[in-house]
Amino acid sequence: MSRLIVVSNRVAPITEGKSSAGGLVVGVLDALRETGGIWLGWNGNIEPEPTQQPVTESDKNIDFCTVALTQRDYDHYYRGFSNGLLWPTFHYRIDLSRYTGDDYAGYLKVNRHFAQILASSLRDDDRIWVHDYHLIPLGKACRDLGIRNRIGFFLHIPFPSPSVLTTIPPHRALVEAMCAYDLLGFQTQTDVQAFVDYATRYLGAAVSGNEVKIGDRSIKVGAYPIGIHPDQIRALSKQSRRSKPLDALKSGLQHRKLIVSVDRLDYSKGLVERFNAFERLLETAPRHRGKVTFVQIAPPSRQDVQGYRQIRRQLESTAGRINGKWTELSWTPIRYMNRSYERALLMSFFRVSQVGLVTPLRDGMNLVAKEYIASQPAHDPGVLVLSEFAGAAAEMRDGALMVNPYDVQGMADALDRALSMALDERKSRYEHLMEILRKNDLSSWRDRFLADLGD
Ligand code: GDG
């Protein structure tokens, strides 16, 4: 049988614990557990010399092959081009994006290095599945080395519309490099359309169905919304029923209602707007004062990248200001925590909360929205309040309360409605959403992508 080789910037830590690695690692790990395969990527370490031979550690049916980065590579490839330019631009934050030619050169160099490592251990019938914005040119770098295997690429974050994408100086080279893949997968049809718009306008591509033809190359494109294993999440959410931290959370609430949010601390997640919306709820719907607590868990992320320190400070001052104004001797409105929790515990927090508040300004998908619903007790489910700019909105808009995260009053109104929603309506929304989560689960994401990639 042909082997599956997954390549992504980071590889899951072998010991799963309370890592806050984020959506890609969570999704890919669960998807690979069933099929088995090889996972190549950075181990998170910085070393003086580039790694020539990856270190392989096996855990059950997965071989984790990891390499270290040099400080220079980290600065240009990871911190510079990937997270200082591509991440903000693809999330429509061109005000935060910084371009330098050195960063771009470093980005290409690391991609070529990954291609060389792949080339040295590849078998003819291996299928290669490349993940995310750090590795856009990897397919092209592989082709340049003569690799002819099937190679697919999946973008976990949004693909921006051409007018935003073209602010990146080497935009054409980037998208041309994407055309070296056999299959390009995106989270939503909107992302597919943005890619197709660019390819037709700037590369003269012709489109028929899900095929994009550029010169003599033909590439398949499609939307593959990443999912979760809803029944596993459900089981996980019940596991910590009797744990100390959950008891502590519940006893602190003293029977108040609970609104919960969990995000990597990132400017794309709309945290400041969300805090303001919660305050607006207290201002405009006084019956909730003292009756509801908002818990925000936000493990720090990319602290050494421009833009992240600023959002952290801004959030600290917003939370401090709101709590300073509204806290009573027996009630703190916002509990804001810059730390990560073990996964099962997080799902149990979702389970005991009445509202899941997921309001990114832009998000490729947002797995928290899906995990929140899957964690709910069927007999008394909570309500999801969801941003229309999360990829998850494409599937979940009929069951969630949809909001525009730039509309503070609109979010406050949605919170009010969610907190007062009758059981019947909550149940029917929940059941509808669970049906979708089961249909588009993580296995179907992987299977559809790999089927379209072909042998
Ligand atoms: C990218 C895209 C896309 C969070 N805090 C803790 C923790 N988490 C877990 C969540 C969830 C994951 O991390 C976060 O995933 P998201 O999808 O919400 O967001 P990103 O990290 O930005 O992921 C995103 C995703 O890739 C997949 O394609 O959906 O749009 O931006 O699973 O539960 N996990 C633990 N402790 C924490 O404190 N254990």
Image: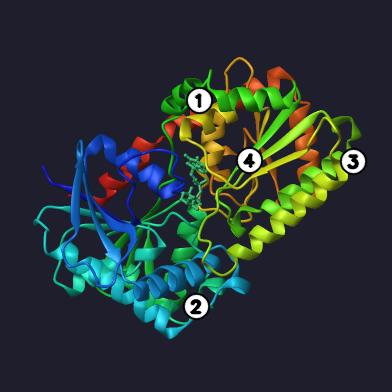
Give the numbered dot on residue 237: 1
**Mark 2, residue position:** 168
Give the numbered dot on residue 63: none
Dot 2, crowdedness within 10 Å: few (<14), some or many (≥20)? some
- Among numbered discs 3 and 1, the one appearing first in the sequence: 1
In this orientation, does residue 214 appear? Answer: no
Q: CA distance from mark 3 to mark 2?
A: 43 Å
Question: Pointer 2 and pointer 1: residues touching (CB < 8 Å)?
Answer: no
Badge 1 amino acid: Ser
- Among numbered discs 2 and 1, the one appearing first in the sequence: 2
Badge 4 amino acid: Ser
- What is the x, y in percent for residue 257? 74, 26
- Among numbered discs 4 and 2, the one appearing first in the sequence: 2
Q: Nearer the viewer, mark 4 or mark 2?
A: 4
- What is the x, y in percent for residue 200? 43, 72
Q: Residue furthest bottom?
A: 101
Badge 3 amino acid: Thr
Q: Nearer the viewer, mark 3 or mark 2?
A: 3
Q: Secondary structure at mark 2?
A: loop
Q: CA distance from mark 3 to mark 1?
A: 33 Å
- Among numbered discs 4 and 3, the one appearing first in the sequence: 4
Q: Nearer the viewer, mark 4 or mark 3?
A: 4
| Residue drawn at x 48%, y 67% as measured from the top left | 83
